[in-house]
Image: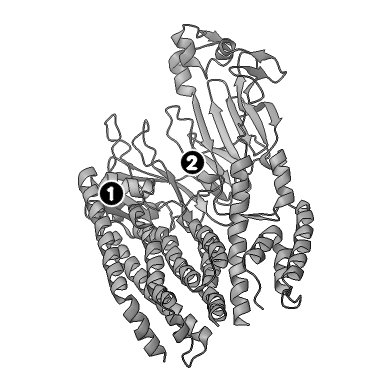
Amino acid sequence: MLIRISRFLLLIIIVIACAHFIPKLYWMKFEKSIRTPFVAYSPVLNDFLISSESISDYKWKDSKDNLYGREEYDSLLPFFNYRQLAATDKMPDLLNGIEITLEKVRLNNFMYRISPADIDYIAIPLYSMLESKSGRVNLEMPDDFFRITQRVEFIDSKTNKIDEEKSILFTNELIENGFSFPAKLIAGNPTTRKPFDEGYFVIDSNNKLFHIKMVKGKPFCVNTNVLSNLGIVHISALEMNLREFYAYIITGDNKIFLLSYDNYKLIELPVKNYDYKTDVLRIIGDLFYRTISVIKYDNIETFVTDRDYNLINQYTETWQGKYESTAGLISNYLFPFSINFGSSRSSLSNLFIRIPGYQSIFLLLACVLIAVGLIKYRKESFKKSFTDLLLVLFTSIYGLIAIIAIKNVE
Amino acid sequence: MFKALVYKEWLKVRWTYISLSLISMLAILYIFLNVSHGIELNGSVAFWSFVIYKKYMFTADITYLPFIIGVVIALVQFYPEINSGRLKLTLHLPMKENKILLQTVLIGGGLILFLTAFNLLLIGVFSASYFPVEVAKNTLLTLIPAYLAGLIAYFAVSAIMVEPIWSRRIPMIIFFAGFVSVLFGFGDYTSTLLLFYLITGSFAVVTIILSGFYFKRGIK
């Protein structure tokens, strides 16, 4: 009995290895790259400009399928291509009645991307509190790192000891502003590669959102009064010279908000069908528009708003996803399930099990028949091979490989 | 009887085990000497930032060490048994053969587990002296898969050694290699995945019973 059990457990290990490596090798051989289209909004055409794989090199199309060459494209997206236009002296001075200067364009241009892997990430919960008003042009990294557990603690990296004085100073300031420890989420940019510093956005244990930074060595803490029942899952803080909003906020019900400089007012982006667990979000800002793309594995939806975030246009394009391609359709017939330990949608190593559906039943039946044949051929008793048949019934080709590799004990 | 078995196994592996323990200790010392050197050259802020924000794994050099320890201990423990047919004698001891085989691998596994705990303790203490406790915790978490791989590799190689026929040995080598290789991936392992590997990895403990069965039947 024990021998049978030990063999069966070995079979399970083989099934796991097969369920990971066979689909992996299959996809290494047959996966084709899928280039997601780039969708921008032209203030000249008042229409979308799309570059995608289906169009030949250096060609762009609008939503009515008119094609444009490279130089036309440059002029149709003057904000996006301002450096090229300025270099060739083709930058317009006036657009839609508004005076255009390079400074204005530069100040208003931005591009930001949030992928599911940015959200499904575990950070080491230690942060640098930069001095946000040092009077110097360049930001400097402080010597210490802080944590927010039952209080704020600053740890000096030179000694690996807590700076009590500074810790108490910050803890008291937070308590005075109604912060309840510990912090649930801390978001900021601990880098000197930014124009200025806005510190951190911190969710306390009562789900209140606080803005915390250091101003001239003193703690600065403000309750933003953002609703605590929002269900925030992610905050991307950014420091842009435009100073229109502090951060992107993503909630559990897949809403996207901007946290504005106007008294921390929330602005909801008019975006539909976004799922933070699976979709990439791309936000392009310029002098006239905000172009927000939700990129799924087989389609892109782009929403354009004016500067007051009113939706003015919308574009959708779909393509063949990985599992709709020929290789993908065949894979659905081949593999009853597959086990992956990594995913483009996560920064973590985890169990990702994919079960495609009914198509794999055909191969499953064939595998069971082969297993029956094999048992007969090996002259094993069906009673003793019952678990083998059961294994093949549940794991199809993987189970079959396992029982071929490790013969049943007589 | 168990005591005698422990003594017998210890006699076989003691010099290898002591050497591997010394090697792992030296490797850990090397790693933290490197950390201290890195901090001296780059400054503590830059080094800490690199570790905290970029998740720089300063222990990357010892990723494969637990695996090597597991494989070497299994080879040293089972090579003489197989090569000079001593296992045949062992299986004739007045004890159930399954029990004897299980106890043999549990002794080896126990030794490796002890070395693992000692290594992790050392790394934890060193990490906590150079970095805040959050970093020490993260360092240990990132090493758990590698040490788990070492343990699974030990049980797998033991079973592969005892297995007498190459036509079963080869698939065992291939599938175990694939199974263990997942633990050398990158990124943070979630507790779900570690638990999954702990459970399925423990299946490998009893593979020796199957190999032992074939071994005994093969030489009859």
Mark drawn on residue A236: 2
Give the side of residue A81 with respect to residue A309, left or right.
left
Task: Give the colouring mode of the picture.
Answer: one colour
Q: What is the secondary structure assignment of the residue under circle 2? A: strand
Q: Is residue B30 above or below residue B70?
A: above
Report x, y in % for residue A168.
30, 56
Q: What SS does tag 1 mark?
A: strand
Chain letter for mark 2, please: A
Q: Residue at x 74, y 65 (%)?
A: A371
| Residue A252 visible in the shown view | no
Name the image quarter holding the C terminus of chain B.
Answer: bottom right
Q: How many marks?
A: 2
**How dense is the environment of label 2, judged by Cα within 10 Å: few (below 14), some, or many (20 and up)?**
many
Residue B110 appears left or right of A305: left
Q: Position of residue A212 (x, y in %)?
A: 39, 45
Q: Are marks 1 and 2 on the same chain?
A: yes
Marks 1 and 2 sit apart, C-alpha to C-alpha, by: 23 Å
Q: Which residue is mark 1?
A: A144
User: In the figure, B161 relative to A336: above or below?
Assistant: below
CB under 8 Å between discs 1 and 2: no
Residue B94, above or below B88: below
Which amino acid type is marked by label 1?
Asp
In terms of depth relative to the viewer, which is nearer, A167 or A238? A238
Q: Which mark is residue A220?
A: none
Q: Which residue is rendered at x = 58% and y = 52% of the image?
A: A229
| Dot 1 alpha-carbon crowd within 10 angstroms: few under 14, some 14 to 19, many 20 or more | many
Where residue B45 sits: x, y (%)? 27, 46
Dot placed on the residue nearer the N-terminal end, 1 or 2: 1
Front residue (pair A1, B123): A1
